Amino acid sequence: MRKTKIVNQKGFLLVETLIVSVFIMGIFSLLFTNIVPLIGEYERYKNYNTVEATYIAHWARMIALKGLPTDIYTKTASIGYIDISDCNLYQENNSSTICQNFKDVNNITKLYLTTYNTVEFKKYIKDNNSFSRDFKEYIDYLPTYSKNTNKTSSKGYYRVIIEYKANNTNKYGTMEVAL
């Protein structure tokens, strides 16, 4: 009769389980450290440039193009920005009434016309304490648009920036204005 030697394998299952557990925990920790910041960033920026904000900014752009006199654009090009929230600025084509109706319907609180490159506007907002923290964060979030040298203020490219309230939350949008 042959005797077979039995190898003691009781510890192999424990080592294998530990290795797989460490591997799985490593994957979960990697996913956690990469996904949680993305969720936080989404929560922070979810009120910026939504489809609704882009649509409202588009109509703000149309009203600005049809209603603002050309000297407003010249002034914007020289100082970098101008507050166009006052509907009395809109002098062309009965636009002051259209502007006021537009602001009332969309709960618009701020309208700004800036040069395409928003560097000057960002400096103004950063140094001025009369703006809300949310608005300052949105303006800081915006790129400067300075890399596109074809769209300078001398060529008639501007930007309209809006702030409006929806569900008791400030929301923001921007749209390019080309003369």
Image (spheres, rainbow, N blue to C red):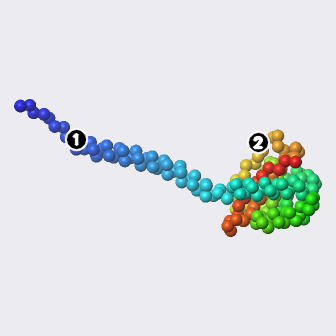
Residue 54: % across, % down: 74, 54
Please state which of residues 74 and 162 is positioned toward the viewer in this rendering: 162
Name the residue that disc number 1 marks.
9
Question: Residue 63 sits in which quadrant?
Answer: bottom right
Q: Three-letter amino acid code at disc 2? A: Lys
Describe the element under mark 1 as helix, strand or loop: loop
105 to 71, vertically: above or below: below
Q: Amino acid at mark 1?
A: Gln
Given contact means CB atoms under 8 Å apart, are the residues at marks 2 and 1 in contact?
no
Residue labelled with disc 2: 147
Q: Residue furthest top?
A: 2
Of residues 128 and 168, the one nearer the viewer is 168
Name the residue rendered at 41%, 47% in the picture.
Answer: 24
Label for residue 71? none
Residue 79, image quadrant: bottom right
Mark sitting earlier along the chain (2/1): 1
